[in-house]
Amino acid sequence: MGLKVFVGRRDQLASVDEAVRLAHTGEPQFVVFGGEVGIGKTRLMRHVADSSAKSGMRVLSSACVELGVEGFPLAPVTAVLRGLVQEMGEAALPALLPGADALLGLLPELGTPAPAPSSQAQMFDLFAALLRRLGAERPVLLVIDDLQWADRSTRDLLGYLARTMRAARVLTIMAYRTDDLDHRHPLRPFLAELERLRGVRRSELARFSRAEIAELVAGLRAAPAARPLVDEVYRRSGGNALFAEELAQADGIGDVPDSLRDLLLHRVEQLPPSALRIVRLAAVGGREVPHRLLAATASLDEVRLLDALRAATAVQVLVATAEGYEFQHGLLREITAADLLPAERARLHRRYAEAIEADPSTVPADRLAAQIAHHWHGAGEDRKALPALVRSAEVAGNMYARAEQAQIIERTLDLWPRVPGAEQLSGHNRLDLFETAVSAATWAGEDYRALGLIDRALAEIDQAREPGRAAKLLAHRGMTLHNLDRDGALTSVEEAIRLLPAAPAHIRTSVLDLVSAVFALRGHPARARDAAEEAAQLAADLGDVKVTVNARTTLGWVLCQLGAYDESLATLQAASDRANEHNDLVQVARAQLNIAEALASLGHYTTMIDAAHAGLHAAYRSGVSRTLGALLAAHLCAALAAVGRWDEAESTGATALDMDPPNVFSAALYALRAEIAFARGEIETAREQLSLARTLLGPVSHPGPAALAATRLEAEIALVENRIGAAQATIAAALPAATSTSLALYAWPLVTIGGRIETHARVRARVQLRSATGDGAIDALRAVAAHLPTHTPLFRAYAAEFAAETGEPATSWPDVVEAWDAVGSPYPAARARLRAAEAALGVGDRPTARRWILAAAEQADRLGAQSLSEQVRLLARSSKLSLGAQAEPRARTGELERLGLTEREIEVLHLVAAGRSNRQIGEQLFISAKTASVHVSNILAKLGVNSRGEASATAHRLHLLDE
């Protein structure tokens, strides 16, 4: 007896219908259903899949698979690919999508060589492109069940699809168990991030109402249900669809136990003995068991096996699939397996392992090693599980599933001490496995796991016997500690250097390359240069082109940190050319990234844009768009913003963020978007983007470029909001990090805004008739500025602006204008023109002031810098220089503007100083008395005074009543 009708879920079906409609128009949609065990998620998705197939959509069904601790890497992807090959034929996919051979490499049974193991991003791109191509033929429904078992790589892929899919007729529906998600479950942050994206709908299925339970019971019995039966089923099921279905199908309500476990087992135990044995065997086999594998382990002839399976499927304990059988409910499988005696469960695991080894074709090739490892481990046969685990890790690596590869190797290493002769059995050295796991964890961005593996390996190494291996791990430890923003990075690389003399030449090269990078990142550029030069020479002596190019690229980057820009650019361009000759596109992208950084320090933005474009092209072709590509996009965005091409810069940043880059790269992009919003005068947008950057950066002990850029913008926002104290505190806290010359590109803007803040602080002090207290802050800023380089056009422009802000007599604001014009950066040039106008007004040179005002207004308007345009016009109007007005300006009005008073507030302050009441102010300015009161309150806060009398005294002191 089975349920023939679909019950309830009207809201969810309506949501799916809308998602289907949008997907048909080319707008990709993602629908995520959550719910407790038995709530009806799988049934809902089957119903949607059946309806979609009938409407002409191509349905691609898959599920995440639990197997031991790790699960199958990318199980939904291989399931979809396998289904497409069966439906369309192996040759159809490459014909549909050039490059699809790389995807088919994920199916070892096809015999297609796997692509390069470092290109997970390329695989993501290809899978997304495949879905788009399929959708172009007819709309696609991608179904993914049991998302709670998704491995890291599957979650990364789904996040990538949700962020990057555009103009594709694809609807993805996913379901997960809420019961399985404790507060540490990795699916929780994934779902929270996913839900914020456009085109994603998420809902949790509620339990059925009594009316829906009545409908369900009637559907099961093919007749209206009696009220007592409905009441009893509703009471005992609590509205859970699975519970209700089991209760309704029980022979007698009074005999059905209250425990769901017993309830489900009761259903299984009613099966005939042969069917019961098959169901127990299937429960140990996993989520889905291929028919051939079940037949090989069942010890039944074909007729008796089919009879047993027919009995199990008739009552929907098992459900037939395209390749085999799965349980109607995953919980039913878990309870059935758990009910077995330990010895019985171990015996069945053994039968599976033996059957698979006897005929590997009984399971999909990509799951072969994992299945063997799982079953031998379940059988308690560690000696046989160990080599299978090693092979499983290799398969995961070939599938780009780096996080899973690291997890499997960790499990292998944990098992190792219990297996005599483990090295001979596995064919691998234990420390080699540690190094592979470290590399995999690093590629996956799991620095904490990498650090744990490194420390475990170092604890086992005899440094006297293997100095090279120890040095390599210590260098990796230094880089990992830096990535985690933790102390000890320099100590680790110093230990690595100590071991180098005894290490082989090829190891010394790779270690020195890492060491030089850590030295540079931690502010020791001279030592970084020495290490990089030695690494490059060693690599050249070895004749290894790839290692040589890598070392020369690192050397070029270090030279940039030292300020040797011409030598840096020559070294990097040579490295890029040689990498291009050998088709090493990753190194081309890396070299062009460093070229762009060197050009940024010079302020050569046009050439920088060309380099960033070249690097992005190489990054895309080599499958590193999410890492090196994101950094290149950040440099391109910065260069475009610097020359005033703000729309292009915003578009570049948005495209890069769609690739879902790692946190620190995303933070840099969000900080750049915040900077553009701020320049446009969109302060709230700037604050939102900056908050995203800060969240992604997390706590920072050693501020790098992104953190310094974010800090500087936080101070600027505080300044325009007239929170002078907060702005000063922000700069003071970040100033120690700005002393590194290798961070001059980010330190100079911080120091310059610090000078501007102190200028505002001095103005406020004069307004409030108190002594300025900023001498110490200015001295600290000058001390940092004195150590920063000034030998490039960009740095000279910053140095000139800082000198003008802090009152250095040798530098005038026209000098600052000239410096920024030489760089070709219009926004700071327009800001400098505004300050030049203020300076001219201060000495009574009105014609010169007017020329500066007109030039600043034209430049700000062309950029779309709304806030700067308003400041320029306010100065013109308050100084009676608005396009030819000849009246003398009121003295010191510019100081009030720098305190943040708007034009209206200056008008109100003038009337307050004249003794007007709020009502009189309102009548004169044609505003309400209440609005006038609000303006007065704002004025008191901005002037830092407590009463109208104090405000009036301030107005007189600034000569606001002078005609």
Image (cartoon, grey):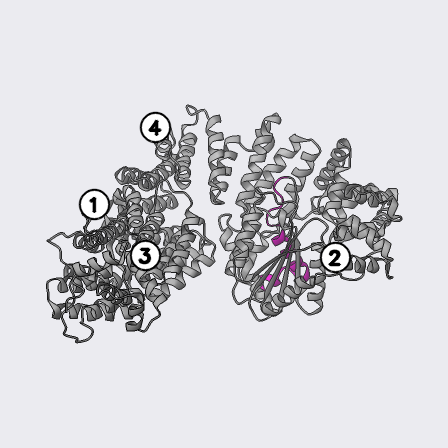
User: In the rendered image, which residue does mark 3 sit on?
Assistant: 721
Vertical placement of residue 554 versus 690, above or below: above
Distance of mark 4 from mark 3, alpha carbons?
53 Å
Disc 4 residue type (three-letter): Arg
Distance of mark 2 from mark 3, alpha carbons?
53 Å
Vertical placement of residue 776 versus 883, above or below: above
Q: Position of residue 156 (x, y in %)?
A: 53, 51
For image coordinates 42% across by 25% down, the residue present is 463
| Left or right relative to 310: residue 671 | left
N-term mark: 2 or 3: 2
Q: Residues within 10 Å of mark 4 (few under 14, many from 20)?
A: few
- Quarter of the image where one finds residue 222: bottom right
Distance of mark 1 from mark 3, alpha carbons?
20 Å
Q: Are marks 2 and 3 in contact (CB under 8 Å)?
A: no
User: In the rendered image, which residue does mark 2 sit on?
Assistant: 209
| Number of residue marks | 4
* Helix, strand or loop under label 4: helix
Q: Which disc number belongs to residue 773?
A: 1
N-term mark: 4 or 2: 2
The residue mark sitting in front, 4 or 3, is 3
Farthest residue, direction bottom: 884
Q: Is residue 86 magenta?
A: yes
